[in-house]
Amino acid sequence: MTHSTDATPFQFSEGALAEIRTLMQKFPEGRHKSAILRTLHLAQEENNGWLSIAAMDQVAQALSITPIEVYEVATFYSMYNLAPVGKYVLEFCHTGPCAIEGAERIVAYAQQKLGIRTGETTQDGMFTIKEVECLGACGYAPMMQVGEFYHEHLTEAKIDQFIDNCRAGNINKGTWRMH
Amino acid sequence: MSRKVLLANAHVEGIQSYEVYRKNGGYRSVEKALKSMTPDEVVEEVKKSGLRGRGGAGFPTGMKWSFLAKPEGVPRYLLCNADESEPGTFKDRFLMEKIPHLLIEGMITSSFALGANTSYIYIRGEYSWIVRILERAIAEAYAAGWLGKNILGTGYNLDLYVSPGAGAYICGEETALIESLEGKRGNPRVKPPFPAVKGLWQSPTVVNNVETIAAVVPIINDGGEEYAKIGIGRSTGTKLISACGNINKPGVYEIELGVPVEEFLYSDQYCGGIKNGKKLKALVAGGSSVPILPHFLITKTAAGESRVMTYESLADGGFVSGTMLGSGGFIVYDEDQCIVRNTWNFSRFYHHESCGQCSPCREGTAWLEKVLWRLENGQGKLSDIDMLVDISKKIEGNTICPLGDAAAWPVAAAVRHFREEFEWHVNEPKACMERNYGLITEPVATV
Ligand SMILES: Cc1cc2nc3c(=O)[nH]c(=O)nc-3n(C[C@H](O)[C@H](O)[C@H](O)COP(=O)(O)O)c2cc1C
Ligand code: SF4
Ligand code: FES
């Protein structure tokens, strides 16, 4: 995914800042950089599902590290989106065990239904399709992850129903927040 | 032969909660270890048990623990590897979802044995709902006095945290895991120094798989010798196998090491046979990184002996006709599956997941993917088949971490056992595109 240069400012909510302080305490004195992955997850959640430069810079500030340390990390891990995404990101597993249970057929169906290819977002900004590697659900294939949740044993009918539910606002994506 | 020591209570109603877990005998191993054993005695029991790492490599756990350096005044760390990203593997997830306190209990007993006062569970970021399950269990354990300061009045202190990743198979490699936990890119480190000497924040560190740590609980409860009675030879104890692919009953099964592969595959107690009445074509016994075997080498070795689910029996025949138990990711292919396509798919996986530090891995995985793609898409040449073997040889053994080998071996094995099918893709591209694969025949002479 190419990096977006969108310059919209970003600010963590008070709640997120408090949470980041708690996260930092899980690591010894001076090792708070270790909180970076989870802080990036929070930033992504508060920035409509993707990491802008502004969001990453705020992560650097919150953890008192340099922005380059954040960019380095954000560009390494596949869960971070570096360009805008739709409200619902459908992440289909396409690895071997899912593939032999019909993942390719399911992805093609979703692409056709939404009129987009993998990596694209629908014009109404509702859906993005991503293809990802094995998510540890191989026995319940084919599967996709949306937000925090796994949707397993996918069929065309389940995709239809899921998309309808999203459009009706009935899908809870979950949250990266601690409880 | 179906004793369960990890999942025995996994289906007890409410076992996710502390109360129910405790009522069913939970946290006894912590009581026993902290109150009546020295850390070295705990390590000794684990040695006696013969337990081998369940993350893939099968290294003896007790021995690994005894390598841990113990310089004065330097903290030591125990890290639980819950990255679980090897295609075909979903057992750690099952254990953590069903019986989270077993892992927490194992972490406490193991941390005590290693003299760690801070421990982390590094879990793949996609398992975010499990992060929540574990954090709830940890909070309960703190509230009940199993974690924190002066546990059970013994003077032993332990803090336990969960730290999620963000999508990267390579972070399952132990030094990449450590880098990631330090808040960096998951680039594996050059070894030595090994984590046992310089690991997390340059301190002595042990990294163990979820299942390995959970197994410490029954080992301490019942004694290492008792645990060693389960299994066969140097494959002691039970193993979680995650079975998937074209079978009737995919899922996670706890087996006693030594169950015949045939029984595991066909009995109703386990996989329940091949789906839709089809025939078995091939099988990957231990996650995508281990060599794939054709149907005639799975239930029997090349010498005609029954193959059983142990480290040794699955490896019988070495790279010529054997495979590995690996992570326990058991992937079954029926007669309709295309080996070339599957090999291409796995190569794409390794190419995507290569961290890019070493040229043989970074470039080699890209080449493997590219060449396999053109073979699968009817654009290959016969010389491509040997090129695949050549590329895998050039990757193997020439990289910083074993991801290079993991990418190379499955390709080499697929070509070794299914060369006919690769050739067919070159000679009959049309027929292949129509996906009429069929069973390859057993070669008359063995190599
Ligand atoms: C590329 C790669 C990925 C790995 N992924 C995992 C993993 O997801 N989980 C795991 O426990 N071990 C994984 N390992 C093995 C670990 O490096 C390490 O050997 C293991 O965590 C040790 O624990 P054990 O001795 O209890 O098995 C991986 C190794 C490599 C080379
Ligand atoms: S072998 Fe591959 S994954 Fe491992 S360090 Fe080298 S480039 Fe990275
Ligand atoms: S292959 Fe899709 S979840 Fe493992």
Image: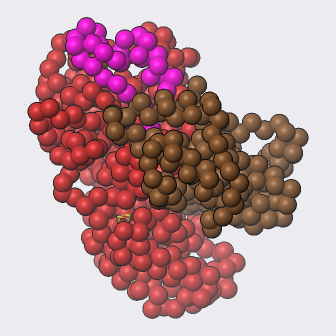
Chain colours: A brown, B red
- Horizontal side of residue B2 vs B131, given as left or right: left
Give the residue furthest to the left.
Answer: B72
Q: Residue at x 19, y 38 (%)?
A: B65
* Quadrant that contains the C terminus of chain B: bottom left
**Highlighted range, magenta:** B135-163
Say whether residue B47 is visible. no
Q: Residue B144 magenta-drawn? A: yes
- Horizontal side of residue B416 vs A100, given as left or right: left
Q: Residue A27 magenta-drawn? A: no
Q: Residue at x 22, y 58 (%)?
A: B191
Instruction: Using the image as rendered, state which of residue A173 and residue B71 is in the foreground.
Output: B71
Q: Position of residue B156 (x, y in %)?
A: 24, 17
- Horizontal side of residue B396 vs B372, given as left or right: left
Instruction: Using the image as rendered, state which of residue B34 and residue A99 is in the foreground.
Output: B34
Instruction: Using the image as rendered, state which of residue B432 and residue A30 is in the foreground.
Output: A30
Q: Is residue B436 above or below residue B318?
A: below
Q: Position of residue B198 (x, y in %)?
A: 21, 47
Q: Residue at x 63, y 68 (%)?
A: A2
